[in-house]
Structures are given as C-alpha cells and as structure tokens.
Amino acid sequence: MADACIIDGKKFSAELQEDIKQRTNILKKEHKIIPGLATVLVGEDPASEVYIKNKEKRITEVGMVSYGKRLPKDISEKDLLAVIGTLNKNPDINGILVQLPLPHQIFEKNIIASINAHKDVDGFHPLNVGALSNGNEGLVPCTPRGCMILIDSVCRDLTSKTAVIVGRSNIVGKPLAQLLLRANCTVTVAHSHTKDLPDLCRSADILIAAAGQPEMIKGDWIKPKAIVIDVGINRKKTQNGTNRLVGDVDFEKALKVAEAITPVPGGVGPMTIACLLENTLIACCLQNGVKVPDA
Ligand code: NDP
C-alpha cells in the first residue's frame, strides 16, 4: 500500500494568512478600519513568551495592530480583571487573547468569562461555547477550526463518517466534537477512562489525537485509509540527548496505514495562529457592523 498523503499544515496556514492579509487590506481601504488584537501575558514562562511573540509577529504581518500587555506573575485576579475591563472598553481592540496557563492565584474561568464575548478570539467564553453547541454563530476555538480546514483539504464531505477524538479538553476535544457533528459525522470522544481505546480508534474514518501522550497511538490502532489528525505536541529525548517534537501518533507506522495524516511539527500547530487571525478579522467586522470581506 502506498504511504499516506502528508497534510501540509504550513502550506495551508500560509495560504490562510495571505488570504487574511488581503481581506484586512480591503477592510482598511473600504471602511478605514484596522483590526486590533490585545495579547495578554502574565508572568515570564519561556514557552508562553515564545507563543505570544509568534502571535504578535503574525498579527503585524497581516496588517493588523498588536497591543501587547505584559503583566507581573504575582498580579491579583482583581487587577487582571481590571486590565481585561479596560481592554473590553477600548474600541481599537477587537480581540483579546489571554495566554494560558495563568498563575495559580488566578481562576482561569473567571478571566475567560470576563472577556467581552465579541472580543473572545480564542472562542473559550461560555457564550461562544454555547453558540457552538447550539449551532449558532460565534467565535470558534482556533485549533479545532484549524483541524477542520485540514480535514476538508483531503475530504470535502464528511457526512456519515465515523470520527473518534482522543481527548476531551475544552480547547480541543469538546469543540472539535461539535464541529464534526455539524459536518454530519458520528462522533465519539475518548479520554483516560475509555475502555479498549485501540479498538475504538480502529473504528474511525477520521481519527483525531489530542491527548498529549507521545506516540501513544500505534500503527495497528488505525483503520486502513483513515484520515489522521495529530494535535499532540510532545517533547521526546533522542538517543543523543537532544529534544525532538513528536505528536500523539506513531507517525512512521501510521504513514503506512492511513490515507492522509498531519505531521508534527508542521501539521495542526501552524493552523492555530492563522485561525486566530481569522477570528480577529471576523470579530472586528462584527463589532463595526460591516460584512467580512470575501476571500
Ligand atoms: P489536556 O491535557 O487538557 O487534555 C488531554 C486529554 O487527553 C484529556 O481529556 C485526557 O483525558 C486525555 N488523555 C490523556 N491521556 C490519555 C490516554 N492515555 N488515553 C486516552 N485519553 C487520554 O490537553 P489539551 O487538549 O490542551 O492538549 C492536547 C495535546 O494537544 C497536547 O499535546 C497539547 O500540547 C496539544 N495542543 C496543540 C495545539 C496546537 O496548536 N497544535 C493547541 C492545543 C493543544 P481525561 O480528561 O480523562 O484526563
């Protein structure tokens, strides 16, 4: 059997980013509006610093304005809520992104709920979560949206497909289940208490791995010709002592069985930021009462 097609997330992300750049330009020319995104980082976690700098760079690359906010790691929840309140009121800021995780003294759910739902470009606010499950319009979480674009690139019609998602987090597994349901899949969400996970995975036409467990999903867990989307990002020590990024799927083995598969790195990861830019554009248009420019 021929090897699976490797779904190139970098390529799709670059295409989406270019598309957003053009649409942002149209918004500027026709309506004199420039989308703005506030990125809030609490503390100095090196990984979070890298993520946020990357997001800020991409925001400016598409012609939007980035408002970076760096806050001390010992900030109180009350003070952080006050910062969010100010950003909520600022009409130049159309999107607010609070980099997670937050320090232990802050209750994440309170912060997420305090963001104006129309500026919630991560799609984590309860109103956006509810809209997604009701089938209403709202801002959709970026990683699940990116997964759907990648799946669509290899399979246009998902009707009647069996989808299995390994992982039930609020940011990946649960919202992705809603999007796949909308696309008429039959969806099962697995987690750490699921029995017979290998068998369940073998039933999947579309298998999404979002457990954060390095190479947990073996080649013989995959149904021949399945579409495999690997969301996991894990560091694995190599024999020479360096770190290498791996997903939740044993990629080399899966390549021999699947129809199409995303690599790690270079699969789902790059799509997440591109979808954040898209959400910022959508949020900006909604707040200004203008139609989102066509691609
Ligand atoms: P969480 O830790 O929040 O959730 C992990 C989920 O996987 C939980 O539901 C957990 O079950 C389940 N799980 C863990 N171990 C097993 C197991 N052995 N068998 C079955 N289920 C298991 O992770 P996230 O959703 O935040 O992230 C998942 C992965 O995706 C991580 O590697 C993360 O780095 C990556 N990620 C990548 C992104 C990207 O842009 N590419 C964005 C976001 C995340 P239970 O609920 O029972 O504990």
Image: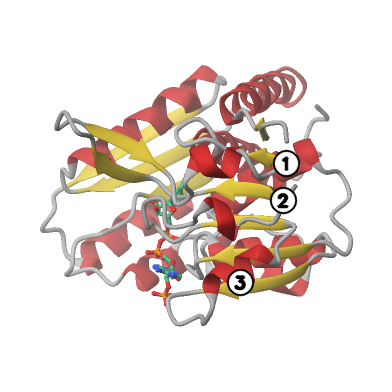
Which percent across, then down, holds residue 249?
A: 48, 49
Per the image, the residue denoted by label 2 is 226
The answer to which quarter of the image holds residue 246 is: top left
Which percent across, then down, holds residue 43?
A: 17, 48
Viewer-nearest of discs 3 and 2 = 3
Per the image, the residue denoted by label 1 is 259
Please give the label number shown on residue 199: 3
Taking the image as shown, residue 284 lies to the left or right of residue 183, namely left
Where does the C terminus fall, quadrant-wise?
A: top right
Amino acid carrying mark 2 in the image:
Ala
Separation (CA) of disc 1 from disc 2 = 5 Å
Amino acid carrying mark 3 in the image:
Asp
Q: Residues within 10 Å of mark 1 (few under 14, many from 20)?
A: many
Where does the N terminus fall, quadrant-wise?
A: top right
Nearer-N-terminus badge (3/2):
3
Q: Residue sitting at 49 percent across and 61 percent down? A: 171
Taking the image as shown, residue 223 lies to the left or right of residue 108, namely right
Nearer-N-terminus badge (1/2):
2
Amino acid carrying mark 1 in the image:
Glu
Q: Is mark 3 within 8 Å of ligand 1?
A: no
